[in-house]
């Protein structure tokens, strides 16, 4: 696991956007796993800037979003498809094929088991995910894989913890319907990605970050399983890194790794 600490949230977004640019320029038909929430918004803004500057194209890119609320249509303003359209896809509309932008949408009356299986098949048929972008829940969840989630899990429906519901309530109006279930890629699905970049910003994520990096690997802390993936980069701002143990080591290691990457390139396993 490589840990990179940036001065600001904007610097985090810059770093991740440049990784994505490098990947797509290396492999035009790359498959990206995307995340929603407040943390990636700055990242998507940076990608739009790169697109507008003709530094990257998404014409041949396929995307799979991590999750989607249960029984919310893609046109609903609280849906993650709506979120992605608002913050990214509509801003690069002429450059991306939205039919290749996938979400695990499951409406009332549809069998979530079948929807999950279909999503897994779509990922496999796309050749697997080359780079998965992750956020980090304050309780250690990745996607909507809440504590106690199986490390072998695939895309499925999950009941959200009260902590996650409370954390996300700021995004809903007082009398607005807020789902307590969601479809999510499973932990095994996430681990099948060739590369993973996890982003965390803000002091409120510092405890979860410390548990992710140096805590015991346990289903009580789903993100901890990322310690076992061979190509994980964790990119933090200073606030999110404030409780990381042995921080001087990670700062020095990041400098040395950057030298190697500049010499030999990134994403060596992609063809």
Image: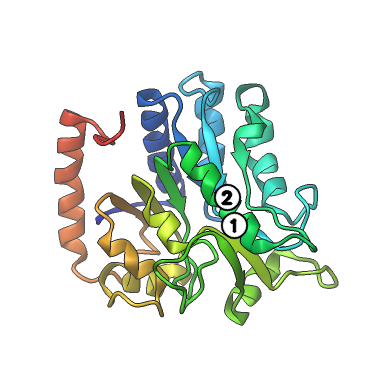
Count of numbered badges drawn on the protein: 2
- Towards the viewer: 168 or 23: 23
The picture places residue 106, in percent across and down from the top left corner, at: 71, 57
What colouring method underlies this structural image? Answer: rainbow
Residue shown at 18% from the left, 68% from the top = 246
> Which quadrant of the view contains residue 144?
bottom right
Instruction: Classify 162 as above or below 96.
Output: below
Residue 119 tag number: 2
Q: Verify CB contact (< 8 Å) between mark 2 and mark 1.
A: yes
Instruction: Classify 146 as above or below 40.
Output: below
> Which quadrant of the view contains residue 221?
bottom left
Left or right, 156 with respect to 30, comes to: right
Left or right, 37 with respect to 225, comes to: right
Instruction: Classify 267 as above or below 58.
Output: below
> Which quadrant of the view contains residue 14?
top left
Inspect this view and state whether residue 199 appears. no
Residue 116 tag number: 1
Residue 135 tag number: none
Instruction: Classify 132 as above or below 20.
Output: below
Q: Secondary structure at mark 2?
A: helix
- The C terminus: image quadrant: top left
The picture places residue 248, in percent across and down from the top left corner, at: 17, 61
The picture places residue 242, in percent across and down from the top left corner, at: 33, 68
Residue shown at 69% from the left, 73% from the top = 180
């Amino acid at each position: 696991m490589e840990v990179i600490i940036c001065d600001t949230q904007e610097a985090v977004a810059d770093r991740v956007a440049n990784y994505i640019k490098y990947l797509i320029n290396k492999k035009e038909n790359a498959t990206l796993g995307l995340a929603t929430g407040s943390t990636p918004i700055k990242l998507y803004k940076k990608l739009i800037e790169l697109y507008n500057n003709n530094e990257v194209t998404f014409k041949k890119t396929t995307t799979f979003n991590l999750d989607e609320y249960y029984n919310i249509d893609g046109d609903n303003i609280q849906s993650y498809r709506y979120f992605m359209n608002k913050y990214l896809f509509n801003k690069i509309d002429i450059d991306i094929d939205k039919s290749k932008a996938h979400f695990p949408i499951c409406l009332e009356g549809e069998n979530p088991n079948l929807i999950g299986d279909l999503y897994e098949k779509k990922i496999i048929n796309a050749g697997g995910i080359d780079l998965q972008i992750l956020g980090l829940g304050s309780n250690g969840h990745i996607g909507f894989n809440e504590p106690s989630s199986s490390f072998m899990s695939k895309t499925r429906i999950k009941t959200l913890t009260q902590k996650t519901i409370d954390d996300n309530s700021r995004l809903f109006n007082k009398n607005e319907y807020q789902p307590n279930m969601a479809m999510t890629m499973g932990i095994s699905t996430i681990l099948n990605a060739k590369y993973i970049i996890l982003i965390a910003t803000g002091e409120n994520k510092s405890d979860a970050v410390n548990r992710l990096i140096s805590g015991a690997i346990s289903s009580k802390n789903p993100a901890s399983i990322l310690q076992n993936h061979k190509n994980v980069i964790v990119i933090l701002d200073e606030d999110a890194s404030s409780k990381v143990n042995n921080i001087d080591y990670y700062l020095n290691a990041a400098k040395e790794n950057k030298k190697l990457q500049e010499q030999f390139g990134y994403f060596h396993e992609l063809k």
